[in-house]
């Protein structure tokens, strides 16, 4: 079977960039690589996801419960696996690099629930996606950590530069804060490899959050995947 690596993180943390950098670096090493990105926007499998993220089920993430929203994303992954990358996963020489995966449900949907329900939800989620649906379980999840203040700033900058509208996950600051708390909890429980996407600069007195360069983050990711220099 292929080795499946997931690049995860809160919104604005640079997941897409880092997944691409990792895939390109592996190809330069002669590795057969398959890139994945979830949700699979524009496909039939992502219809419910896009309805939800576009605000069709409510303007706020909490308008759709954690279990219902998780099901939308899980089914998108299931359809993608069955129709698109099932054959590549069965190749022993393949490395799959996924931008977001089941771990994204842990980040974004866990945050909607009371703390006392977190473990039950995570148990349900892992059983639902990996056992009931039968999609592959990752060999490793690499989580890019970023404070919500920096996430919001980068999301706004990206939207301004690209003209891409922000989804309901990206417009709610309190929700983004809750997602980071949930993500760090899940990262500890499932032993994700946590890589900071920022540093705290105190050179000018008051602490400032500074984004690390893509090259610095990339180097850490390659080491976490076991392909570092």
Image (spheres, rainbow, N blue to C red):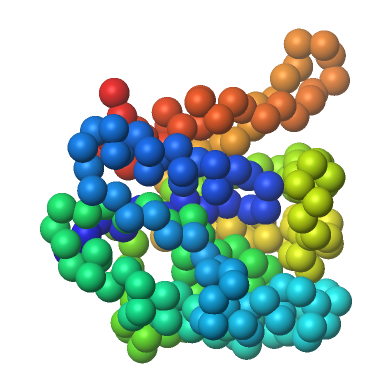
Q: Quadrant of the C terminus?
A: top left
- The residue under the point 85% across, 76% down is 59
Q: Quadrant of the N terminus?
A: bottom left
- Residue 202, image x, y percentages: 75, 17
Among all residues in the image, which is located at the extreme left? 92
Among all residues in the image, which is located at the extreme top? 203
How many numbered circles are shown?
0
- The residue under the point 75% across, 29% down is 209
The answer to which quarter of the image holds residue 47 is: bottom right
227 relative to 216 in the view: left or right? left
The one of 112 and 134 positioned closer to us in this rendering: 134
56 relative to 92 in the view: left or right? right
- Residue 53, image x, y percentages: 72, 73
- The residue under the point 28% across, 32% down is 28
The answer to which quarter of the image holds residue 131 is: bottom left
- Residue 117, image x, y percentages: 61, 79
211 relative to 61 in the view: left or right? left
221 relative to 12 in the view: left or right? left
Q: Is residue 39 above or below residue 37?
A: below
- Residue 64, image x, y percentages: 73, 84
- The residue under the point 84% across, 14% down is 205
The answer to which quarter of the image holds residue 30 is: top left
Q: Is residue 120 above or below residue 5?
A: below
Whether residue 113 is visible here, answered yes or no, is no
Whether residue 59 is visible here, answered yes or no, is yes
């Amino acid at each position: 079977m292929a080795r499946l690596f997931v690049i995860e993180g809160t919104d604005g943390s640079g997941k897409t960039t880092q997944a691409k950098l990792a895939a390109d670096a592996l190809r330069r090493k002669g590795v057969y690589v398959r890139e994945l990105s979830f949700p699979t926007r524009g496909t039939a499998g992502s219809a419910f996801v896009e309805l939800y993220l576009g605000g069709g089920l409510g303007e706020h993430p909490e308008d759709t419960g954690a279990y219902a929203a998780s099901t939308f994303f899980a089914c998108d992954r299931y359809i993608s696996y069955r129709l698109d990358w099932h054959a590549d996963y069965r190749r022993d020489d393949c490395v799959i690099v996924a931008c977001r995966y089941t771990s994204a449900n842990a980040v974004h949907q866990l945050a909607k629930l009371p703390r006392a329900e977190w473990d039950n939800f995570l148990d349900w989620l892992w059983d639902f996606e990996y056992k009931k649906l039968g999609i592959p379980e990752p060999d490793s999840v690499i989580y890019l950590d970023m404070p919500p203040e920096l996430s919001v700033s980068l999301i706004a900058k990206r939207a301004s530069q690209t003209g891409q509208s922000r989804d309901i996950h990206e417009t709610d600051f309190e929700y983004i804060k809750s997602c980071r708390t949930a993500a760090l909890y899940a990262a500890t429980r499932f032993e994700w490899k946590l890589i900071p996407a920022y540093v705290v600069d105190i050179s000018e007195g008051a602490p400032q959050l500074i984004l690390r360069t893509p090259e610095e983050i990339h180097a850490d990711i390659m080491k976490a995947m076991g392909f570092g220099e």
